[in-house]
Image: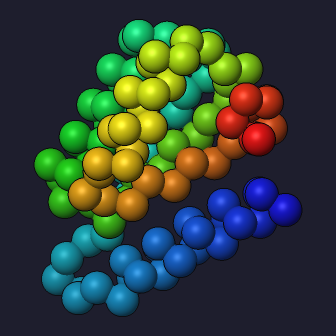
């Protein structure tokens, strides 16, 4: 069910991007994260949000494969996503993010 929602959200974002004028090219920045969430991964995803905004992307797609990790780093990531000027779509694959699935 969550996979279908993620796919639908991505289709919505890319569909909206295709409606843009033919002169501009669509941009969906992709960031991948696997392993334990820590200070470094928090910085990485915060930088991904900044990069998506700087490039004028329509969205940031985060492919997440993690068992969880440091709570403070997770809070920083959530704050970066909530404060983003672009939509952030998180796709959990292959469904190994037990702490993120609740």
- Residue 49: percent from left, percent from top: 30, 42
Left or right placement of residue 59 versus residue 63 in this view: left
Q: Nearer the viewer, residue 15 or 66?
A: 66
Residue 80, placed above or below residue 84: above
Q: Is residue 27 visible?
A: no
For image coordinates 28% across by 85% down, the residue present is 20
Q: As displayed, is residue 7 above or below residue 33?
A: below
In the rendered image, the residue lying farthest to the right is 1
Residue at 29% across / 51% down in the picture? 84
Q: Position of residue 57 (x, y in %)?
A: 27, 60
Q: Is residue 79 above or below residue 23?
A: above
Q: Quadrant of the C terminus?
A: top right
**Residue 34 occupies quadrant:** top right
Q: Residue at x 55, y 12 (%)?
A: 70
Q: Is residue 80 left or right of residue 62?
A: left
**Quick one: quadrant of the N terminus?**
bottom right
Q: Quadrant of residue 101?
A: top right
Mark count: 0
Q: Nearer the viewer, residue 27 or 10?
A: 10
Picture coordinates of residue 80, whole percent (x, y): 33, 39
* x and y, in percent, of residue 14 in the image: 47, 73
- The coloring applied to the image is rainbow
Question: In this rendering, would 41 be left or right of 85?
Answer: right
Is 68 situated above or below 39? below
Taking the image as drawn, is residue 86 in sight?
yes
User: In this rendering, would 13 be left or right of 69?
Assistant: left
């Amino acid at each position: 069910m969550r996979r279908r929602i993620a796919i639908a959200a991505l289709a919505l974002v890319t569909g909206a991007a295709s409606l843009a004028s033919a002169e501009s090219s669509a941009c969906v920045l992709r960031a991948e994260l696997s392993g334990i969430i820590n200070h470094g991964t928090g910085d990485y995803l915060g930088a991904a949000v900044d990069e998506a905004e700087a490039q004028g992307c329509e969205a940031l797609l985060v492919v997440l494969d993690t068992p969880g990790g440091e709570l403070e780093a997770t809070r920083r990531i959530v704050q970066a996503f909530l404060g983003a000027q672009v939509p952030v779509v998180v796709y959990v694959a292959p469904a190994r993010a037990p702490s993120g699935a609740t």
